[in-house]
Amino acid sequence: MLLHLGNQPSTSSTGTGELPRVELPFDARGLRTPEALSIVLRQAEQLLSSHTRTTLSVNFCLEN
């Protein structure tokens, strides 16, 4: 997962099938916001579900 600092989500992608880079928001004290945690959790879920689908597909193909 690729993350860097800032306030607005970026729409750029690495072009390698990875999730796009996201700029995580800060609050007035310079701390990460609950929204930043939500972004990280959402991307982790997407990466894990993608990996799980790939693993299940490979295992199914090997069994048949």
Image (cartoon, rainbow, N blue to C red):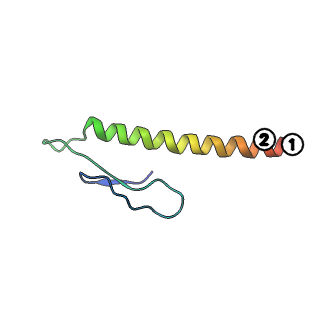
- Which quadrant of the rendered structure holds the C terminus? top right
What number is the disc on residue 19? none
Taking the spot 68% from the left edge, 43% from the top edge, the residue there is: 55
Taking the spot 66% from the left edge, 46% from the top edge, the residue there is: 54
Q: Residues within 10 Å of mark 1 (few under 14, many from 20)?
A: few
Residue 35, quarter of the rendered image: top left
Q: Which residue is mark 1?
A: 64
Q: Secondary structure at mark 2?
A: helix
Where residue 19 sits: x, y (%)?
47, 53
Taking the spot 13% from the left edge, 42% from the top edge, the residue there is: 28
Where residue 2 sits: x, y (%)?
41, 54
Q: Are discs 1 and 2 less than 8 Å apart at CB?
A: yes
Q: Residues within 10 Å of mark 2 (few under 14, many from 20)?
A: few
Q: CA distance from mark 1 to mark 2?
A: 6 Å
In the image, what residue type sits under mark 1? Asn
As drawn, which residue projects farthest toward the right? Answer: 64
As drawn, which residue projects farthest toward the top? Answer: 34
Where residue 17 sits: x, y (%)?
54, 58
> Image check: 6 left or right of 59?
left
Q: Is residue 49 above or below residue 20?
A: above
Q: Which residue is mark 2?
A: 60
Residue 34, quarter of the rendered image: top left
Taking the spot 23% from the left edge, 51% from the top edge, the residue there is: 7
Where residue 5 sits: x, y (%)?
28, 54
